[in-house]
Amino acid sequence: MLKVGVLGAGHLGKIHLRLLNQSEKYQLVGFYDPDEINAKNVQEEFGYTYFENLNDLIDAVDVVDIVTPTLSHYECAKKSMEKGKHIFIEKPITNTLQEAEELIELEKKYGVKGQVGHVERFNPAFLAVKDKIVDPMFIETHRLAEFNPRGTDVPVVLDLMIHDIDAILSVVPSKVKQINASGVSVISTSPDIANARIVFENGCVANLTSSRISLKNMRKSRFFQKDAYISVDFLDKKVEVVKMKDAPEKPGDFDMILQNAEGEKKQIYFENPEIEPNNAILDELETFADAITQNTKPAITLTEGTEALRVALKIIASF
């Protein structure tokens, strides 16, 4: 078992602590949080070992799980990697692109592994259809959330939209060519609503909308590609896969047939991929353990996390 320590015992940090404590692939050594009052409350309530000194915790583990505010990601990761520790780091990878690129170099220099917590890649609905998403040419995403002060220290692009940016980059086999975006600040000092249009070199277009001041929660993505439409509901963990094929010469009574202007007939049919329930956060943490013990590539590398940040920052810059 890999010895692991958690940096940060806020809302998400507590979830990580609970799951790591349950995991059969990790031994939870303890946690560090700069807020001493909160840390002692967490220790008393859950029984996890609280380290008063950050360096002492890093020295005691094999893996450092960084669940701190984004502004401190770089320093926590750098300090851990310099001590030869593997790092799991929550999204976004860092606050600046330069910091992210430096972490990639540190990973190489010290021979450690790093993974970024883009948890939607482990959403069971996305996992059920990812292999069916092949060369999409138009993508539309809506990620809407009710207002929550937690996370408003960064623009909505880094708080919410980056989930969809990462998922899109993982299925579009092309480089970004152009970005146009707009953002509006309503409650926070940084944008609370954002829309971005990303054009890829292969012609694919992605239209992303994110809001953290909506009246209801929504996390949906739709992928349009040759002869297929795929919808992913990340929130309710549901999928729709609608496909087309050449119509049979003698269609059945219940076959759905469309005929285009050129007279070509297509049959519409539905696929129902099996969605296997999982705990996405536990899965991402345990796949990182596998990458370390089996010496394989992490599921979401520091480079991939950096690319998602690069696109997110370009979106923000184009406001």
Image (cartoon, rainbow, N blue to C red):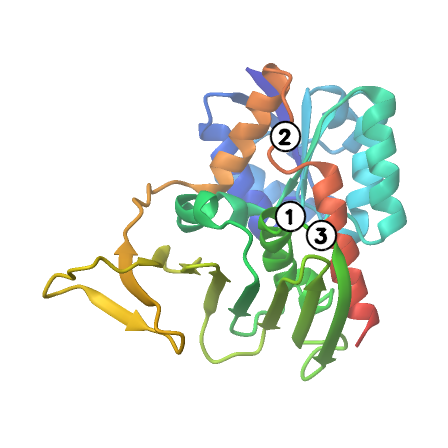
Report the disc number at residue 270.
none
Say whether residue 78 is visible. no
Looking at the rendered image, the quarter that the C terminus falls into is bottom right
Q: Residue at x 87, y 45 (%)?
A: 99
Image coordinates of residue 169 in percent, x first then y, are: 64, 51
In the rendered view, does 247 fall on the left or right side of 121? Answer: left
Dot 3 alpha-carbon crowd within 10 angstroms: few under 14, some 14 to 19, many 20 or more = many
Q: Which residue is mark 1?
A: 173
In the rendered view, tell whether residue 93 sits above or below residue 165.
Answer: above
Determine the CA span between mark 2 and mark 3. Answer: 16 Å
Determine the CA span between mark 3 and mark 1. Answer: 14 Å
Determine the CA span between mark 2 and mark 1. Answer: 19 Å
Q: Which residue is mark 2?
A: 298
Sequence-wise, which precedes: disc 2 or disc 3? Answer: 2
In the rendered view, tell whether residue 91 sits above or below residue 139.
Answer: above
Image coordinates of residue 58 in percent, x first then y, are: 75, 26
Amino acid at dot 3 = Ala
Sequence-wise, which precedes: disc 3 or disc 1? Answer: 1
Disc 2 to disc 1: CB gap under 8 Å? no
In the rendered view, does 228 fall on the left or right side of 189? Answer: left
Say whether residue 96 is visible. yes
Q: Quadrant of residue 205?
A: bottom right
Q: Which residue is mark 3?
A: 308
Image coordinates of residue 86 in percent, x first then y, are: 71, 25
In the rendered view, does 26 fall on the left or right side of 56? Answer: left
Q: Nearer the viewer, mark 2 or mark 1?
A: 1
Decide which of 270, 188 is in the foreground and name it.
Answer: 270
Amino acid at dot 1 = Pro
